[in-house]
Amino acid sequence: MSDSTTNDTGPTTTPPAWWTTATVYQIYPRSFADSNGDGVGDLGGIRQRLGHLHDLGVDVIWLSPIYRSPQADNGYDISDYDDVDPLFGTLAEFDALTDEVHALGMKLVMDLVVNHTSDEHPWFVEARSSRDAPKRDWYLWRDPLPTGQGADAAGTPGAGSHPTAWRSAFSGPAWTLDEGTGQYYLHMFASKQPDLNWENPDLRRAVFDMMNRWLDRGVDGFRMDVINHIAKEPTSLAPGASHFVMGGQIHDHLREMHREVFAHRTGRELITVGEMPGVTVDDAKLFTAADRHELDMVFQFEHVGLDHGPASKFDNLPFDLVALKRSLSRWQEGLADQGWNSLYLGNHDQPRSVSRFGDDGRYRFESATLLATVLHLHRGTPYVYQGDEIGMTNAGFTSIEQYRDIESINWFDESVAAGADPEHLLEALRFRSRDNARTPVPWSGGAAAGFGTGTPWIELVANHDTVNVEADRAAGERSVFEHYRRLIALRHESPVVALGSFELLAPDDERLYAFTRTLGDEQLLVLANWSGEAYELDPALHPALRRRSVPQVVIGNVPGGAGLTLAPWEVRVLRS
Ligand code: NOJ
């Protein structure tokens, strides 16, 4: 958000919004650093490690949920929006953290989870107490259909009484019968995460009031969990309607939120980002156009869905560079004049980016830095997920007992019950499970890796003796951290990185990711060899490659990289 409604400038007008030069760092608190020895990361741990983030140079810290929660989905199931879960600390510690973040010149963004609450939230406890409860309508209820006219628990239409055959994102039906009142409630995620009814004005008021309390407390904005799913029109809940449609009211809800929560906060630099599975470029333009007063940017999912097969996200397809380039460049072009991109390759719901898109073995350093460079040189606001700045790899778990994630475990159990081969399922999880990105950050070598003194809630990655913060930061020219630091600084210093136009080169090349960024007379040429073999550049690709004088390398990952040969996983950014 820019500082006032009348001065709500987007990136293409003057002055550009502050977040065009910013980089956001995501902390998944339970896996970041544990200060009290209970094996779970906490606010105290974050406070001890703020120097790491300050050194990295990030502008904004986004905290995954730290509110009170039964932790069915690691905090994405909130039972009190106004308190910190004792697992993570206290409100007083939160205030201290906010002050410390601000004193270091950074901002703090909260996760806002208002598509659903926990079933232990007092709102839901009241709502389910009777059909006449004042807050009954804050959730979504449907009568059972006469047996045989609805779906059964396995999702078979005509075999049970469920209002629709919808499936929850975490396996099983999206409807659970509340025995006490005899109606089904909707939950797009776990049954412990009932969906809120955003058509109810009192519910919306309660959410806006809560957001205002956090902003008054000093936080600098929100990352909004599955926010495009909040508008479920009554008709879209009908049997046969498309799954979890993005109801037409969504834009109204977001504009109302802007009016009620952000518009009057002139003089503050705030940020809003909406997580939006299924969002298209055209939708995103509407959500993020500055003059529409909805959101600053959205997280879109197109590029992280390219390797999902038709059966489910666990149906793993091989990586296809041409498809990735096509997708990301379509978003670059689509939001060139209106709206703004968020840039990410990993987060707490995705596998580790170096394992998924790069080579997490022999070329771990080169491919981790290549991925970072390609991403950070796009137009948009980059998001760094904790551990990516040291090239952390997937978890490498081999047994279901090692997993903690509700999505992974439910999918495994359901598939085993349906007769699937457990070894095959474990292989899919090894690649795709969300737990791949949720292992504790290894701060140093040694058995506990400097994460804390207790047994961590989830195992460390086996390579933590070599892949850890201390080792990486001491690695000189081969420090992933140092490379990220330079990329983040480059965006601060260089308007062409923040605002330049984007042009993809060689779109059909299966190994080269090349593009230019141009602003006025200035142009950067990005050349990335997305493969484990040397790559010969074609001088016809760009005039800079045909000149006698060698163009200046702004940033690269192979010392002395020059000429027309790119080493395996080499990336070079040239001032052309
Ligand atoms: C998206 C979050 O990123 C994910 O971790 C969570 O499980 C779901 N939304 C439900 O809140």
Image (cartoon, grey):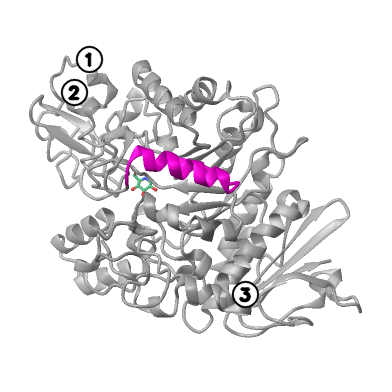
Q: Residues within 10 Å of mark 1 (few under 14, many from 20)?
A: few
Would residue 407 be found to the left or right of residue 317 on screen? left
In magenta, the rendered stretch is 89-111
Question: Disc 2 residue type?
Answer: Glu
Mark count = 3
Q: In front here: 259 or 213?
A: 213
Mark 1 → mark 3, Cα distance in angstroms: 60 Å
Residue at left 73%, top 81%? 561
* Residue that carries the numbered disc 2 in the rendered image: 126
Question: Disc 1 residue type?
Answer: Pro
Per the rendering, the mark at residue 134 is: 1
Element type at marker 2?
A: helix
The answer to whether mark 1 and mark 2 are in CB contact below 8 A is yes
User: Mark 1: is the Cβ under 8 angstroms from ligand 1?
Assistant: no
Residue at left 35%, top 44%? 66
Residue at left 29%, top 28%? 238
> Closer to the observer: label 1 or label 3?
1
**Nearest to N terminus: mark 3 or mark 2:** 2
Residue 327 rendering spot, x and y as whole percentages = 58, 56
Evaluate whether residue 572 shows in this view.
no
Question: Disc 3 residue type?
Answer: Arg
The quarter of the displayed image where residue 196 is located: top left
Residue at left 60%, top 74%? 530
The answer to whether mark 3 and mark 2 are in CB contact below 8 A is no
Q: Residues within 10 Å of mark 2 (few under 14, many from 20)?
A: some
> Closer to the observer: label 3 or label 2?
2
Q: In front here: 214 or 229?
A: 214
133 w.r.t. 283: above or below: above
Per the rendering, the mark at residue 511 is: 3
Would residue 71 be found to the left or right of residue 335 on screen? left
Residue 556 rendering spot, x and y as whole percentages = 69, 73
